Image: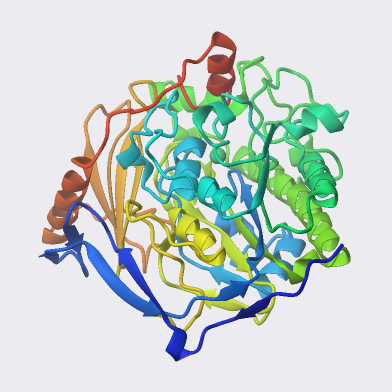
Amino acid sequence: MSLPPLSSTFYPRAFLLVLVVSLVTLGGVCLMGCGQEEQLESSSRVYSEPFPQFDPPPNILFLSIDTQRADHLGCYGYARDTSPNIDHFAAESVRYTQAYAPTPWTLPSHVAMFCGRHPYKLGINDINAAIPLTAPVMTTYLKAAGYQTAAFVDSKPKGMVGARRGFDRGFDVYKHAPHQASVQSPFVYEMAATVEVAQHWLMQRDVNKPFFLFLHTKSVHGVAEGQGNDPRRFPYDKPEPYRSRYLTVDQAKFIWGGPGEPGAEPYLRYLNKQFAHGTLDPATYSAQRVEALKALYDGGIRYMDQYFGVLMKFLDETGLSQDTIVIVTADHGEGFLEHQFFHHIEVYKQLLHVPLIIRLPRDRMGKVIELPVEIGDIMPTILGFAGLEAPDSIDAIRLPLDSSINRPKRQIFGCYQFGDRGFYDAFSLLEGDWKLLFHKYPKNKTWQADLFNVSSDMDELTPITSKSDRTKAMLKSITMWQGLSSTTQSAISLDPETLNHLRNLGYID
Ligand SMILES: [Zn+2]
């Protein structure tokens, strides 16, 4: 069932693609270099860079691993053996060391990936937001170009990556929660089932057309159900042997939902509420429990990785590896109380730094790209693989695919905006070696600016408290960027059951 071979080579200089990009597209504002402000007459930049050309158009498999921190994968330097299959895959791929999500939550980060626009500018800032009808969705361009398109996502129709929010545009098939249909298991978010249905679809597709297959898995995400006193339910809950793989004997004895603990409420949500309301001090939370939570989270990664390996083996055995570009990324990371919360709420590195790995069919040399990029850049890159130009309206830039490519310094904006129902409000700006957070914790009730030198303080643990010209300049950039926000343009109504589910996922109070 293999497809005809593709020609996949970087174009020689004579065929360099002139890529017109909007470098920052902040309404004409661009800061270039460490805090020095520079007004640009135009936000557009022209790059001449090689970009691979495919004839015929390639298959594209795009996997979004919900909640996957970059630094908990072996190929990003993690000490535990959480990801042997992804590590092997990364060694044959283009790996981005500085890929960032625009937000620490699922909906807007996926909007960025599908629309190539910063979700803040699309008004994706509340729990009921949907992709505006006017926003470009990459799948519609792929379908119009002759791709057959399918998605299997760990989400309900009104969930974060739900069809009802507009993510199904351009898809022939958009299936939710495949685990519920195919695997009888007490565990939810089954990568095993996602891979199983993906394989089934691949086997019965039309082999005369290229495909775009989007997979979204929550195998790494914390559970939405309360643990109560049921020792079989953990805050991150995967089948054995993965659940216990990294727990020490002492940690394995840990009983979630003990006296004074949340009972039926999800553990991480319960803790975050206590931290937010000041009834529990994050500094006093047991370090042993933090390590136990990390061990459980890592077990979920190992579980996900196992089935990622199954999927890659399937591509090899069916010959599809020769014709298929595989893209692996995440929508955000996960916090383990490095700052004030668990789960994914804040805009520190632990939440916004994500893996991004792209394997091209005929270039398996393995490359590392250290330029800062955004996951929104995936949209024009996928269109580029299909031989399509991205619409002018997007903010994103095609990803560099060769280590020799250099580009001017770029600003990366992040935010956590959640209507008036969230725990926390935050904006961030990463610019070279510096990152500024402008944020407000509920117990403080005032906005504060924290500057970090991320070259010496990579985990953003020690803010530079003295006010500097750099702080002022970066704050000004954030203020100008805030002016580009949009009110929610498109929204869905949420029924009580969906609201409760999203609440249990930890998003709202
Ligand atoms: Zn997510």
Whole-percent x and y of residue 425? 32, 33
Q: As rendered, which of 26 and 279 lies closer to the eye? A: 26
For the C terminus, which image quadrant? Answer: top left
Residue 387 appears in the figure:
yes
Determine which quarter of the picture holds residue 240: top right
Drawn side of residue 48 relative to residue 263, left or right:
left
Q: As rendered, which of 293 and 351 lies closer to the eye? A: 351
Drawn side of residue 8 relative to residue 240, left or right:
left
Drawn side of residue 220 relative to residue 452, left or right:
right
Direction top: furthest residue: 496
Q: As rendered, which of 370 and 320 lies closer to the eye? A: 320
Residue 107, placed above or below residue 37: above
For the N terminus, which image quadrant? Answer: bottom right
Residue located at (22% from left, 41% from top): 482
Determine which quarter of the picture holds residue 373: bottom left
Direction bottom: furthest residue: 13
Residue 121, placed above or below residue 37: above
Whole-percent x and y of residue 159? 57, 27
Determine which quarter of the picture holds residue 366: bottom right
Whole-percent x and y of residue 217? 67, 42
